[in-house]
Amino acid sequence: MSTPLAIKGIGDKLVVSVPEGEWASALPDLMLALDERGDFFRGARIALQLADRELSATELAALRQELAEREISLWALFTTSESTQAAAANLGLEIEAAPDRDRSEDDEIPFETDLLGDEAVLIERTLRSGQRLQHSGHVIVLGDVNPGAEIIAGGHILVWGRLRGTVHAGASGNEDATVCALDMMPTQLRIAGHIAVSPKRRSRPRPEVVSVRQGQLVAEPWENGARQKVN
């Protein structure tokens, strides 16, 4: 069974939440989860969300070494523990109290809006065969989703690339969810309880959005235009 792992995107980096529990058991669980998604994390730069865990410089150095052996680079820690922050600083790691946003030294104007938003995860890479991404909110992929890859989202799925794998939007039963892609040819596409397989290849790919209309999955151009039923 795949080990649950909470992942957020910050720019071209990933923030991974360490599984709950004592460090002696949480560390093996973390490494197991990373190993199960080896192709996805290989070559990635990640930050770890440690919450209030107190870790020594020796423990952090061992953690960084284990990640390096998996071709994963540890660039930062998100922690509220002052002792862990001090240990991380000694190792040259970046430190933040919480991964709420990607702060920039040039940010002088605070972000304010009266618009409501939902949680989403941003992946800036191609998902390859065997890779699986599951998230309770929306999923945005800046890249392709290859055959054999799978995305399961509680909300919308947006693929800024070619969609060839399996996707399930509105997995918790949300029929208002949609699937958008620049080239829509999924192996299988699901929204809530509705399932469709890829239609025959058209002469030219086009951006499309698939949604549930009157109990049917309907594909339409990613702009105003005629709708087409997905078989």
Image (spheres, rainbow, N blue to C red):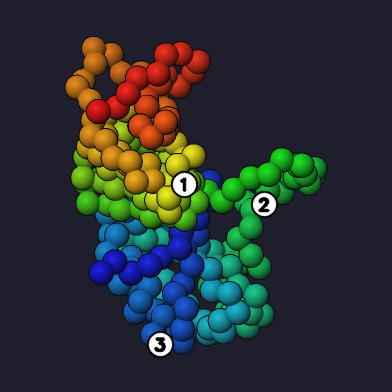
Residue with the mark numbered 2: 103
Mark 2 crowdedness (10 Å alpha carbons): few <14, some 14-19, many ≥20: few
Tell me whether the residue at label 2 lies in contact with that at label 1, contact meaning CB atoms closer than 8 angstroms.
no
Question: Closest to the observer: 176 or 146?
Answer: 176
Residue 204 left/right relative to 159: left
Which label sits in the foreground, 1 or 3?
A: 1
Q: Residue at x 42, y 31 (%)?
A: 214
Residue with the mark numbered 1: 174
Tell me whether the residue at label 1 lies in contact with that at label 3, contact meaning CB atoms closer than 8 angstroms.
no
* Residue 39: numbered disc: none
Position above or below: 103 against 61:
above
The residues bearing labels 2 and 1 have C-alpha atoms spaced at a distance of 33 Å
For badge 3, the amino acid type reads Ala
Q: Residue at x 26, y 35 (%)?
A: 196
Q: Residue at x 67, y 52 (%)?
A: 103
For badge 1, the amino acid type reads Asn
Q: Residue at x 23, y 25 (%)?
A: 199
For badge 2, the amino acid type reads Arg
> Which of marks 3 and 1 precedes in the sequence?
3
Residue with the mark numbered 3: 24
> Which of marks 1 and 2 precedes in the sequence?
2
Which label sits in the foreground, 3 or 2?
A: 3
Position above or below: 62 against 206:
below
The residues bearing labels 1 and 3 have C-alpha atoms spaced at a distance of 38 Å
**What kind of element bears circle 3?**
helix
